[in-house]
Amino acid sequence: MWNPSSPFLRQAGQARPADSAEHAPWPQPPARPGEPTSVVHLRPGDATAAGERIRLVFPTAADAEWKIAGVARAARAAAAFASARSVWIDIANGDTLAAWAMDDIGRANGHAVLCPRASEITAYRHVALPPDQSIAHILKATGKPSDGIVSRWINRPVSRMISRLLLAVPGIRPVHATLLTATFGVAMLFCLLMGSHWGLVAGGVLFQAASVLDGVDGEIARATYRSSARGAMLDTAVDMVINVGFVVGLTACLTALYGPAQAALGASAVAMMVSGLLILAWLARKVGDPGNFNVVKIFYRTNFPTGLGARITDALVFATSRDFFALLFALMIVAGLGGSIPALLNGFAIVWLGLTLWSVRPILAGSAGRVPLVGRRRAT
């Protein structure tokens, strides 16, 4: 991994090793503007860059530190050659890079160096800097293959606009966006617990807003090379609490508006939701992937990859995804159909919990190496 304290690295501006049999002189980077004919032009991600030692030259530290979507330009250039054996970040005028820029480079490419070993300098190929990507392009690449239709066409366009604004804020981190989502969740619960019609409407709208904001922390994390298992677990925990909080608050609100029959339906839905989430959390730990609440989804998609089974699985995944039901419930509440949500929730919860319970045994058997149903393909 990239280590700024390594004796083989230097910050630009520090003394170059003296000429000797052991240390060859540092080559003088070419002056800019204008690149010599020795510059190699490779497309980012080019297969010919795999295993190469790449040299990227910036005229000044200010040029290398220019922020693009909250990350130093040098870091984005290094990330473009992630398949390279190592990437030498060279500053032509000998300036010193700021510590935050060095940190960006380290996160973007663990093989980036500020100076290679003197004996290896001639092995580095001077590569033309890749073109700067637009913020829109960077954020578009942060989408996930698992995004549903609602997320892809409604939530993501909005969340990317929010992410773009937040990335302009100095010091922004993914956890700040997670806390913003949690704040909307608290506001949602407060509105629902008011027990009034307008509290119900506001709560439904805030639930959908929280669903949109849920994508912001992940977008910022992927755009700034700050993705982590810890952050993903925190994001999942906040999502689950907001989901359960919505059903609890909705039940309280509808009970105040329409009577105790709503309380029984709501309590049943909450009980099944919490039971299913606890089972998912337990399964995730058992298979060695704590915090991954997609373990059951992966199981069904793996075992029913094609045909009718695949179509049924896709339909169930779509219907039980948060982006879909948050939008559906918000629209139902605004349309005056909020009283039907608890009964609908119970129907979804029965199917979801039943499928979760049915998958427990084969998932555990597969993780123990006895009956490897997880990962097994059906014969077609």
Image (cartoon, rainbow, N blue to C red):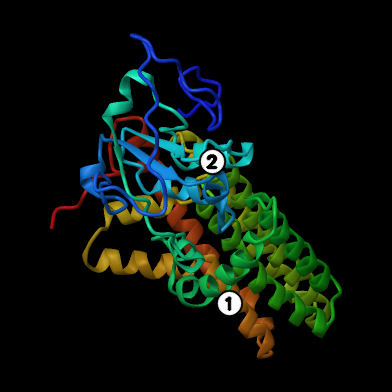
Which amino acid type corresponds to the residue marked 1 in the rendered image?
Answer: Leu
Residue sitting at x 68%, y 87%: 334
Q: Quadrant of the C terminus?
A: bottom left
Q: Nearer the viewer, residue 223 or 340?
A: 223
Identify whether 224 is placed above or below 164: above
Crowd tier of the residue under label 1, counting other residues whose Cα lies within 10 Å: few below 14, some 14–19, many 20 or above: many
Task: Residue 173: give x, y in percent of width and height.
Answer: 65, 50
Task: Residue 67: give x, y in percent of width and height.
Answer: 57, 55
Residue 130 visible in rendering: yes
Crowd tier of the residue under label 2, counting other residues whose Cα lies within 10 Å: few below 14, some 14–19, many 20 or above: few
Which amino acid type corresponds to the residue marked 2 in the rendered image?
Answer: Ala
Left or right position of 212 against 46? right
Residue topped by disc 1: 327
Left or right position of 350 against 176? left
Identify whether 161 is placed above or below 119: below
Residue sitting at x 47%, y 65%: 134
Q: What element carries label 2?
A: helix
Left or right position of 42 against 293? left
Q: Which mark is residue 229?
A: 2
The disc, 1 or 2, on the residue closer to the chain's N-terminal end is 2
Identify whether 122 is placed above or below 79: above
Q: How far is disc 1 from disc 2 in space, using C-alphas?
A: 28 Å
